[in-house]
Image (cartoon, rainbow, N blue to C red):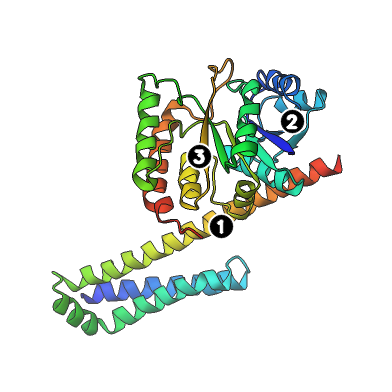
Amino acid sequence: MTITLRIILIICSLISFLLCVTKIKQAKLKVSNSVMWMIGSILLILMSIFSHVVEWISVKLGFMAPVNFVFLIMIGFLLVQVFIDNIRLSELNEKIKDLSHYIAIKEHNEK
Amino acid sequence: MKVLLIIPAYNEAENIEKTVKDVTTNTDYDYVVINDCSKDNTKEICEKNKFNMLSLPVNFGLTSAIQVGMKYAYQNNYDIAIQFDGDGQHQAKYLKQLVKEIEKNNADVVIGSRFVTEKKPKSMRMFGSNLLSFAIFLVTGKKIKDPTSGMRAYNKKAIEAFVKNASLTPEPDTIVYMLKKKMKIKEVQVKMKEREFGESYLKPIKAMEYMINMFFSIIFIRAITRKN
């Protein structure tokens, strides 16, 4: 990995980590939701600091370039995040639906 | 037996009055109109005529409308719940046969089917219907001739299943679920009319999406339903 890429990765992950922390403090993000992002950014920092480890693994796995391995990990991480979000969305949808049912039946009973 | 008709209505201002009149004159069953947050004056018409109505505050689609009807049936201890379209396609005179099938033959679900004795006409819609029938046959080994029919009667056991399991929908994949749960599903010949006014829940553009959803659900999700 080039030194520029490592610096960019470190900066980006630091920013995302700080963003997580400040958003939690402002109570805009739930702790449980932010943990994954923090783990992600720590992972990025680790990968850019110990880039020789990444290089060693990527060679062993047969990647053309170590950076490809980094991207693969990031994509995998994002896919998991999107999937978790999707589950949460469905849950929310279900809850709103239940609420609307509750309102409709309650209104009916009160008449 | 206490029978409840669940009449989902979304933007059915032109049809709803006639549908409910048909129900009240031809049967002595209870009914509940589910107004799925219609944009037109369906709600006002129901209120003016003092129809028994549940009015949902947000639009969530047909599934949600049937589910809230099932909850209502469950809470008010109905023995049979029948879904009955509010768009004037279904005729109330066939309802007695559906109820009789549950009372006499102990069926859990009775489908008001267009094709028990009559042949399916050849059209794009019926091609889709055949595909679904085939998928159901593949997964359960049972033949359901009109899987997309919107006129279905459910007994207490099925009502309870609807209330307890939020993933159940008034669609063909639920038939597979119920067959897998060893429920008895019967079909009764009925005739349906073409809708007179308004648009169907199932617009042509959505038909493709509907088919894909149903196929994936039947083959990958409902097929592996456990018996108990």
**Residue B153 left/right relative to B210:** right
Q: Residues within 10 Å of mark 3 (few under 14, many from 20)?
A: some
Q: Which mark is residue B171?
A: 3
Residue B58, image x and y in percent? 66, 41
Give the label on residue B29, or none: 2
The residues tagged by marks 3 and 1 sit, at their Cα atoms, a distance apart of: 21 Å
Asked if B122 appears above or below A92 in the picture, the reply is above
- Judge whether B32 appears above or below A107 on screen: above
Question: What residue is shown at x 45% (from left), y 22% (from top)?
Answer: B117
Q: Nearer the viewer, residue B187 or B148?
A: B187
Q: Residue at x 32, y 68 (%)?
A: A74
For numbered disc 1, what is the local secondary structure? Answer: helix
Q: Quadrant of residue B40?
A: top right
The front one of B180 and B90 is: B180
Looking at the picture, does residue B129 appear above or below residue A101? above
Report the amino acid beneath label 1. Answer: Glu
Q: Residue furthest front?
A: B104
- Residue B44 x/y as whole percent: 77, 26
CA gap, disc 2 and disc 1: 35 Å
Please tell me the numbered disc located at residue A91.
1
Residue A97, given in percent of the width and then of the height, sits at 63, 48
Mark 3 to mark 2 CA distance (whole Å)? 24 Å
Residue situated in front as seen by the camera: B82 or A24:
B82
